[in-house]
Amino acid sequence: MRALFRPVFIGLIVLRYGLDGLMLDSLRRPGLSLLGRVLATGRRLNDPRGQRLREALERLGPIFVKFGQMLSTRRDLIPADVADELARLQDRVPPFPGEESVLLIEKALGRSIATVFRDFEVQPVASASIAQVHFGVLHDGREVAVKVLRPGMLAVIDDDLALMRTLAGWVEKLWADGKRLKPREVVAEFDKYLHDELDLVREAANAAQLRRNMQGLDLVLVPEMIWDLCTPTVMVMERMKGVPISQMARLREAGVDIKKLARDGVTIFFTQVFRDGFFHADMHPGNIQVSLAPETFGRYIALDFGIIGTLTEVDKDYLAQNFIAFFHRDYKRVAELHIESGWVPAATRVDELEGAVRTVCEPYFDRPLKEISLGQVLMRLFQISRRFNVEIQPQLVLLQKTLLNVEGLGRDLDPDLDLWSTAKPFLERWMHEQVGWRGLLHRLKREAPRYAKLLPELPRLVHHNLERGDTALRRDLMAILIEQRRTNRILSAVLWIGLGFVMGLLVARLLLQLHGTGAL
């Protein structure tokens, strides 16, 4: 029944909010714009298009809300006014009954609540579209937070994703920019994020990795996982006590240095990105608190690790070089980096791309440093992608979204925050460590275990291959040898024929000379 009525319900919402006209107008096909105007006849559609789209997604439910949130980060795909509206989407849904949570936890852990917890709060403290959270106390006295997946989420998600994939296929076929923007890949990326969030063991592993990475920084706290009580549908972790980052008045009253907090947030972000290549990619205020405990006073507390971004060494090097080129206004280098990375076709003219990058970046440098946004610069660069057929990399879009979150949070804390001067020394030091002697020693140290294993075996492997040879290589060499012998025979024949012809000419010439002198 759901498979039958869900598409009908979606169709009614599309008509109710006039999304059919938005889609037909954007397809830019002859007659479709006229059809959109005809369909809009008799409907009051006075609200802005972005607002109508946001309200429609909220009406369609949590999965579409999450899709709209992700789409709001893809400003290379959608207009700015629509992206701004989608960024306002809130992932708020009523909690499901606490008694149902108890049953789900007992089923997942295979034990009764009383066996696992000395105390368990049936009333949830937080609720979202994927899961909700309860507080409890273990029998050894540890205070914990218990995250429980909503029941039946997998079936709902799979049904809605199937519809999204169908719609993406239509967009790719009908829209002029459809193939370049790869809507099916966007849906596939969303599919991956959702299913990652549905596996709480994966989220727990993300948290454990981030906790280990951040241990030496002493700027952020990550809850410890209680691994014996973690399953794909239930996650039990250390309870963190802090003040939400949005409650600035309370933080000031407690004596927290707000400006230092803003700088620390930037340091944490760039450390995670450039040192570790593993960053918290959902850093909105709802997932961040500040500790007021005496031993950890003023440190950040990170929560919710369902969305984590990762970067390769190539990604990190590319980003660092781009940012440093921005700092020095070296737009030609930015253009060269885009071509070298394969983001744009190799035939792209460097001077044209350099001019486009200059057009994007130069207006920002006429502003005070505190008003310059790295995230906005990165976003504008993505927006020029259409002209140069740039293929936007998903991991960098996630980074851009997180960078905008970090900048927004930092400026809320300290309006005078100069992100550029905070980031520039960090990036230059990182680049020096990568390309200097430190970088060389670090790479040698990292590769040393593999070298230690291979070097003693190298003489034996060389001797073995020389003695036996690779079968395919030997076959190729024999074919080349046979062909070479055949060619040699042909060349020898041609050479002997040529020599014979020359000798014949010489003999004939000698006979003619002897006949002329009367010797014959």
Image (cartoon, grey):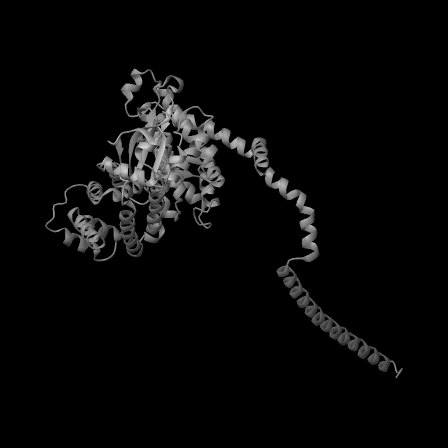
Relative to 14, is 319 above or below? above
Query: How many tags in the picture?
Result: 0
Q: In the visual, does 94 lie left or right of 274? A: left
The answer to whether residue 375 shows anywhere in this view is no
Q: Nearer the viewer, residue 273 or 226?
A: 226
**Image quarter hosting the N terminus:** bottom left
Residue 443: image x %, image y %?
Answer: 57, 36
Q: In the visual, does 265 lie left or right of 478? A: left
**Image quarter hosting the C terminus:** bottom right
Residue 35: image x %, image y %?
Answer: 18, 55
Residue 32: image x %, image y %?
Answer: 21, 56
Q: Nearer the viewer, residue 165 or 364?
A: 165
- The image quarter containing residue 294 is top left
Q: Nearer the viewer, residue 265 or 143?
A: 143
Relative to 204, is 414 above or below? above
Q: In the visual, does 477 lie left or right of 46? A: right
Q: Name the outermost residue toward the left.
A: 42
- The image quarter containing residue 402 is top left
Q: In the visual, does 46 lie left or right of 452? A: left
Residue visible at 39% across and 20% down in the picture = 296
Residue visible at 35% across and 47% down in the picture = 386
Residue 357: image x %, image y %?
Answer: 40, 39
Q: Nearer the viewer, residue 291 or 402?
A: 291
The answer to whether residue 201 shows anywhere in this view is yes
